[in-house]
Amino acid sequence: FDDRDGWIWLDGSLVPWRDARLHVLSHGLHYASAVFEGERAYNGNIFRLRDHTNRLIGSGRWLAFEIPFTAAQIDAACAEVLAANGLTDGYVRPIAWRGSEQLAVSATGTSIHLAIGAWPWPSYFGAERMQGIRVGQADWRRPPPESAPVHAKAAGLYMIGSLAKLKAEQEGYADALMLDWRGRVAETTGANIFLVIDGELHTPVPDCFLDGITRRSVISLARRERMAVVERPIEPADLEKATEVFLAGTAAEVTAVREIGPHRFTPGRITETLMKAYDHLVLQAPEEVARIVG
Ligand code: PMP
């Protein structure tokens, strides 16, 4: 991914893609003292950009560092790197990390860096987004909030998700369902999950995983459609009662699920309605998005 044309925004200026390097003795690489975002641009607008930027800054604070740029500067940099790469639609990836001033576990005295890349990424799950993807079951669980900064989009937490996704793909699945430390349904490796039970939308309480920006958009859209939305603890046995299941995330957008382990679902009216509503929402101007989903 490093040998291509294009521009990366690095610590305040655009540098050629191939030159955006860091030293191998960087704290962020050794101890996962890094936080990132995943954003999508549609028609030249990054969807809910300020929410992503605020989460990035907040994730840094969970890791006890302050990103040395304001939210307005980060927003502008995201837009700048998108335009520099000639993109109006695509994925935007800001990442902040601790530098290479020292390599003890202690992070004292390290500088904080910020880089932003952008590239085309049409659909995370391709054509299966409508038909429904097959999801396996992860061996690894989401840790409790006492064990990790679970509300940060922190690189370290993605060690767990990355292992789960790799194994799922090796077994022929598109993704993996992750349970939390209590054995409850949490999320997949890169998206939140919704179940349709008796015509209502059920989704787990995000008390040990990301309360995704897409998740919150989908909940608002569902309520606007006068659907009942229930946030509650969800047990694996609840999957048996679900008729439809779908995922929600920036990269995944709204993606139908047709299989999780022994359970089968048929993407139906509710998934389709929310998928269409979300696809419509992301194309609106930022003020209109704010008006619709707050
Ligand atoms: N959970 C995980 C583990 C994720 O990586 C993502 C994607 N950022 C989400 C949930 C969904 O978050 P969002 O809708 O803000 O992209």
Image (cartoon, rainbow, N blue to C red):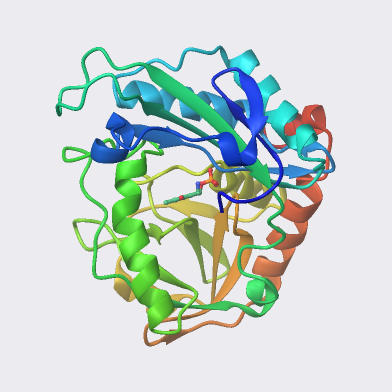
Quadrant position of the N terminus in the picture: bottom right
Where does the image place residue 75, in percent across and percent down from the top left?
66, 23
The image shows residue 184, relative to residue 107, as above or below, that is below
The quarter of the displayed image where residue 256 is located: bottom right
Where does the image place residue 95, in percent across and percent down from the top left?
48, 34
Question: Is residue 175 shown left or right of residue 143?
Answer: right
Residue at the spot 28% in from the left edge and 33% down from the top edge: 25
The residue closer to the viewer here, 172 or 215, is 172
Residue at the spot 68% in from the left edge and 52% down from the top edge: 226
Residue at the spot 29% in from the left edge and 56% down from the top edge: 160
Q: Is residue 147 visible?
A: yes
Quadrant position of the C terminus in the picture: top right
Q: Is residue 234 visible?
A: no
Where does the image place residue 238, in percent across and percent down from the top left?
36, 72
Q: How many marks?
A: 0
Residue at the spot 33% in from the left edge and 38% down from the top edge: 24
The residue closer to the viewer here, 72 or 27, is 27
Question: Is residue 253 shown left or right of residue 174?
Answer: right
The image shows residue 8, relative to residue 251, as above or below, that is above
Question: Is residue 285 shown left or right of residue 53?
Answer: right
The image shows residue 205, relative to residue 145, as above or below, that is below
The residue closer to the viewer here, 280 or 98, is 98
The quarter of the displayed image where residue 76 is located: top right
The residue closer to the viewer here, 229 or 173, is 173
